[in-house]
Image (cartoon, grey):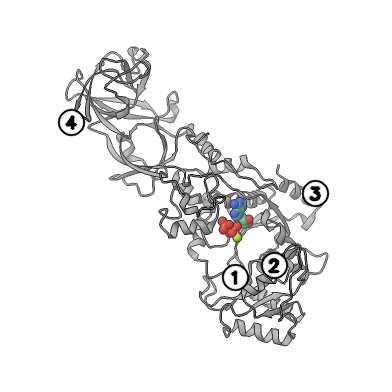
Amino acid sequence: MNFIEEIVENDLKAKLNDGRIQTRFPPEPNGYLHIGHVKAICMDFGIAKKYGGVCNLRFDDTNPAKEDTEYVDSIMRDIRWLGFEWGQVFYASDYFDQLYELAIRFIKEGKAYVDEQTAEQIAEQKGSPTEPGKESPFRNRPIEENLRLFEQMQAGEIPEGKMVLRAKIDMANPNMHFRDPIIYRIITSHPHHRTGRKWNVYPMYDFAHGQSDYFEGVTHSICTLEFVVHRPLYDWFIDQFVPQGEYRPHQYEFNRLNITYTVMSKRKMLQLVKEGLVAGWDDPRMPTVCGLRRRGYTPSSIHTFIDRIGYTKVEGTIDLGLLEHVIREDLKETAPRMCAILEPIRLVIDNYPEGKEETIVAENIDGKPELGTREMPFGRELFIERQDFREEGSKDFYRLSPGGREVRLKNAYIIQAVSCEKDENGNITVVHATYDPNSKSGTEGGNRKVKSTINWVSAEKAVPAELRLYDRLFSVEDPSASDKDFRELLNPDSLKVLTAMVEPALKTAKQQDHFQFLKQGYFVVDDDSTAEHLVFNRTASLKDNWQK
Ligand code: ATP
Ligand code: MG
């Protein structure tokens, strides 16, 4: 049980809010969800599910300059893909009328004023945690004037940036958020994705968030630790219009998810997308939910990851290796193990009858016939990995070299190399071998053991496939800690594309099907893949190659 579940259980015992449990997931629709959000989603939806409550979805859409319905749609799609169902869908913009009324009420009660200073001047007067701030020269203007100006702001008569509405609280408060925070600003440059041009003033996030929780009846408002310092301000706003002793939401905070070799910020991800440094929000190198999906991560592997990292009150960074580990564990037991030859070289079995073809029935996972079998055509000419042949053998090379060791072709025969052909540049083009007709796997001779087994596909029947070999997007552990711009820290080898020859059984693979390509790693069928042009994305290598 995590510490928030403990709080919820105690509240249930104490019959707080008549035993009602209501949470919400409150994304700002200004980007796609990333794995950090998933941590919050699993908490918000998880609590509601476990304790028979409800988790609503609320879009915190208070900044029309950055928000869009594209993001709203993607957020819903991603939450469903993760396997969660929300109760209702709310928008902070549903409350713009109520929030505007509240701002007017604050003005009338002498708790808010219109400031005409620039953003820089206001910032300069903020002071520091140890020094009190300075009062704005507009702080004590008459209530009537404040009302008139705020109404003019909303009427579109004041240009953007010329005036803001500030709460009149305390310029010396040790909590900087109490130093007359801005609660409303003018935005006329962009229409709102839901309210269009109705509003020229918009509430700041801090003036909308806590009140939205209150309007909806949220009992446990769960968020990340950076909001600890905002909590007293949210409570203060509510205290101004809700009598003591009545229902109010309570906020609880847990540690954010940070992952090595990753930037966990929508703003930075948007830059990567906009500048074409990745192929889109769903680029398989992105830590977004849609990127992880396209990379081949399954919802269950992501849930396992979130369970492993847990929830605490201490900030830290999780090793990306853990995320890669959980998907390997997930796919290890289920993904069919097939052959893909990444660097093909032709192998001719000289003593195999010309024109003959056999069908080899191979188990998808060795020793687990219940997971199915597939047929592999076998013939005189095959493709094998170039690196499985060396012209000059050596004691520690266990694969093919002329006159060297015997090697088993996976699920088929034992062969021995005899010679090779080269082109005019000296590159090897064909390997010749002979086979032992009595060594076929599954027959008595198949039990004969040799030191190594290599992969192959039929040269005649294999199909080409585009393989996208993805790796970590950044080459340094903590891109945010560097003096350099994060875009200079991208891993230049994060994507290699090549054409491999794969078993014909893969022709019928469908989007999102998972495979292990023997000795190569875990792969998933890409969304762009078609029967005519197969595309596979590497989800993960077989082992952690980055382990120090
Ligand atoms: P970003 O910094 O990437 O823009 P954000 O916090 O601004 O993220 P929101 O849409 O405001 O994004 O976040 C919605 C919810 O997701 C919030 O409750 C927030 O606390 C939570 N959240 C965001 N990032 C993380 C993270 N890295 N780990 C855990 N929770 C997160
Ligand atoms: Mg935010």
The part of the image, by quadrant, that contains residue 370 is top left
- For badge 4, the amino acid type reads Asp
Residue 109 at x, y percent in the picture: 77, 79
Query: Which of the marked residues, 4 or 1, is nearer the chain's N terminus?
Result: 1
Mark in front: 4 vs 3: 4
Pointers 4 and 1 in contact (C-beta within 8 Å)? no
Q: Is residue 323 above or below residue 180?
A: above
- For badge 2, the amino acid type reads Gln
The residue that label 4 is drawn on is 423
Query: Which of the marked residues, 2 or 4, is nearer the chain's N terminus?
Result: 2
The residue that label 2 is drawn on is 211
The residue that label 1 is drawn on is 93
The part of the image, by quadrant, that contains residue 459 is top left
The residue that label 3 is drawn on is 13
Mark in front: 4 vs 1: 4
Gap in angstroms between the C-alphas marked 1 and 3: 35 Å
Q: Is residue 418 above or below residue 369?
A: above
- Secondary structure under the numbered disc 2 in the rendered image: helix
Gap in angstroms between the C-alphas marked 4 and 3: 80 Å
Q: Is residue 5 left or right of residue 278?
A: right
Gap in angstroms between the C-alphas marked 2 and 4: 75 Å
Q: Is residue 213 above or below residue 151?
A: above
- Out of 9 and 433, give the one closest to the viewer: 433
Q: How many marks?
A: 4
Q: Is residue 385 visible?
A: no
- In percent of the image, x 51 and y 53: which residue is there? 484
